[in-house]
Image (spheres, rainbow, N blue to C red):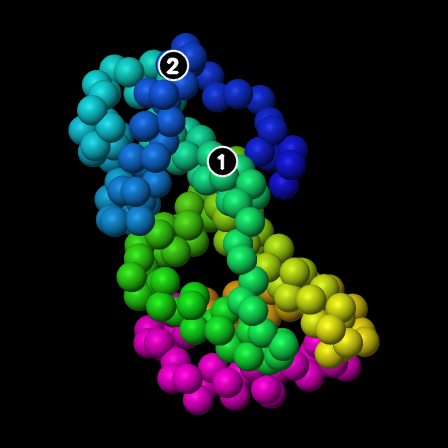
């Protein structure tokens, strides 16, 4: 992931940092509002108060612009410390994570779907999109596991990436296959029947 984020700069003339960040932030906002396919450079420029000439001077096409905006979002995510819920129960924390994810998706579904679509495109954009999907859950799962071990709640050290993959797999299945938010009972059942047995094995 580091090599992707720190790779060679996109072609084009450099922009003023403030103007470039305004364009990148506008692109991420619009991605969340309308999804990848309906996002246009014109809409991004109008949102950022810039000309299309300014954008095309820096990025040759939409995929390059989105690769840059997702790279910025990933780096910002890496630098942001998400507070872990104060709890003495790993099970309750896992239930809370899934509940938050589904609530967030209902509020902004196009961002998740847009990242999934982008992950199937050009190599760089695809890799960055996958990183956006993977990083947050893995880092948070790692902190939860370390917290549970420090409390003496668990003795094993499961791979946080695999725990995150289980959470992500359940989330994407519900979003893309069933197209509905699972009930609290269903979320608890997944945590009790799948996540906790995997962590405690």
Circle 1 is placed at which residue position? 71
**Residue ranking furthest to the top:** 13
Q: Quadrant of residue 30?
A: top left
User: Which residue sits at x=35%, y=52%?
Assistant: 111
Q: Is residue 183 above or below residue 150?
A: below
Q: Residues within 10 Å of mark 1 (few under 14, many from 20)?
A: many
User: Which residue sits at x=53%, y=54%?
Assistant: 82
Tell me residue 172's x, y (percent).
45, 67
- The residue nearer to you, when weighing 192 against 178, is 192
Q: Quadrant of residue 61?
A: top left
The dominant secondary structure in magenta is: helix
- The residue nearer to you, when weighing 42 against 144, is 144
The quadrant of the image that shows the N terminus is top right
Of callouts 2 and 1, the N-terminal one: 2
Residue 107 is left or right of residue 76, and the answer is: left
Tell me residue 164's x, y (percent).
60, 64
Which region of the structure is painted magenta? 173-201
Circle 2 is placed at which residue position? 15
User: Which residue sits at x=76%, y=68%?
Assistant: 150
Tell me residue 192's x, y (percent).
59, 86
**Residue ranking furthest to the right:** 155
């Amino acid at each position: 992931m580091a090599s992707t984020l720190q790779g060679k700069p996109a072609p084009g003339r450099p922009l003023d940092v403030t103007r470039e960040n305004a364009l990148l932030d506008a692109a991420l906002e619009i991605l969340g509002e309308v999804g990848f396919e309906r996002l246009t450079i014109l809409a991004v420029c109008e949102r950022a108060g810039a000309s299309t000439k300014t954008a095309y001077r820096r990025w040759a096409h939409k995929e390059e612009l989105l690769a840059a905006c997702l790279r910025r979002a990933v780096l910002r995510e890496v630098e942001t410390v998400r507070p872990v819920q104060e709890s003495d129960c790993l099970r309750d924390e896992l239930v809370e994570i899934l509940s938050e994810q589904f609530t967030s998706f209902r509020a902004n579904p196009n961002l998740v779907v847009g990242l999934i679509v982008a992950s199937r495109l050009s190599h760089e954009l695809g890799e960055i999109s996958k990183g956006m999907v993977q990083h947050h859950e893995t880092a948070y799962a790692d902190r939860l596991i370390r917290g549970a071990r420090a409390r003496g709640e668990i003795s094993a050290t499961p791979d946080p990436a695999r725990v995150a993959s289980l959470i992500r797999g359940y989330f994407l299945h519900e979003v893309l296959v069933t197209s509905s938010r699972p009930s609290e009972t269903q979320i608890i059942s997944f945590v009790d029947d799948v996540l906790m047995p995997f962590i405690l094995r």
